[in-house]
Amino acid sequence: MDVTRCGWVGKDPIYQEYHDKVWGRPVYDSHELFAKLCLDGQQAGLSWLTILKKQQNYQVAFANFDPAIIATFDDDKIEELLLNPGIVRNRLKVNSIIKNAKGYMAYVEQGNDFSEFLWSFVGGEPKINHFTSVAEMPAQSIESEAMSKALKKLGFNFVGPTICYAFMQAVGMFNDHTTDCFCYGLEGPRY
């Protein structure tokens, strides 16, 4: 079946599957949000497709993104990760996931809910934009700037306003499917 998708998708079946079933669908699970935020940080300077193709490798290498386990990673584990061809072998990016896990753990150990914190930047509900083309989509927003600042205060890194906006799109905080896309206006399942 030939369907109209957002202009950024292209012909790659992995990208199409991601667009059709994941991108823009609301995610409320704190663990899943942590994983997606870390993966978006890995994208910096690369295409999202590169990270998407390595997603399974990241899940294995980083203990299924369990922040409690990742926060214990030591120098030996970092060196092991830097030899793993299945992930982006960049020391700053590997360290960022560990740093983010420590920030996450410190936040939730104080009795805070990570999902509520992240969703608070959009008032707890998805914002549905009405863009007719990808060219209309901003690279960042007031909300992503605020999220970036707040996450950095918690000790996170690789969470600039542009990365935060991409993250917010991916997890359905902003539903930025273009108005001609078959996914426009579909909320889909909540995770």
Image (cartoon, rainbow, N blue to C red):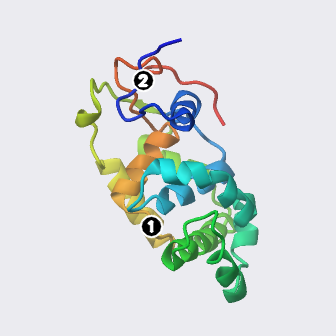
Q: Nearer the viewer, residue 139 or 91?
A: 91
Is disc 2 placed on a helix, strand or loop?
loop
User: Could one spot residue 62 in this view of the protein?
Assistant: no
Name the residue at 74% across, 69% down. Answer: 68
Counting other residues with Cα less than 10 Å from the Cα at mark 1, is it few (<14), some (14-19), or many (20 or more)?
Answer: many
Q: Left or right? Give the position of 66 relative to 134.
A: right
Q: Is residue 190 above or below residue 157?
A: above
**Residue, disc 2:** 5
Q: Position of residue 14 (x, y in %)?
A: 57, 37
**Residue, disc 1:** 158
User: Could one spot residue 141 in this view of the protein?
Assistant: yes
In the picture, the disc for residue 116 is none
Q: Position of residue 125 (x, y in %)?
A: 49, 34
Q: Position of residue 183 (x, y in %)?
A: 47, 21
Q: Is residue 6 above or below residue 111?
A: above
Q: Residue 70 lies in what quarter of the image?
A: bottom right
Is disc 1 placed on a helix, strand or loop?
loop
Q: Position of residue 124 (x, y in %)?
A: 50, 39
Mark found first going from the N terminus, 2 or 1 = 2
Counting other residues with Cα less than 10 Å from the Cα at mark 2, is it few (<14), some (14-19), or many (20 or more)?
Answer: some
Residue ranking furthest to the bottom: 75
- What's the amino acid at mark 2? Arg
Name the residue at 63% across, 74% down. Answer: 102
Name the residue at 35% across, 57% down. Answer: 161
Q: Quadrant of the C terminus?
A: top right
- What's the amino acid at mark 1? Phe
Name the residue at 63% across, 69% down. Answer: 101
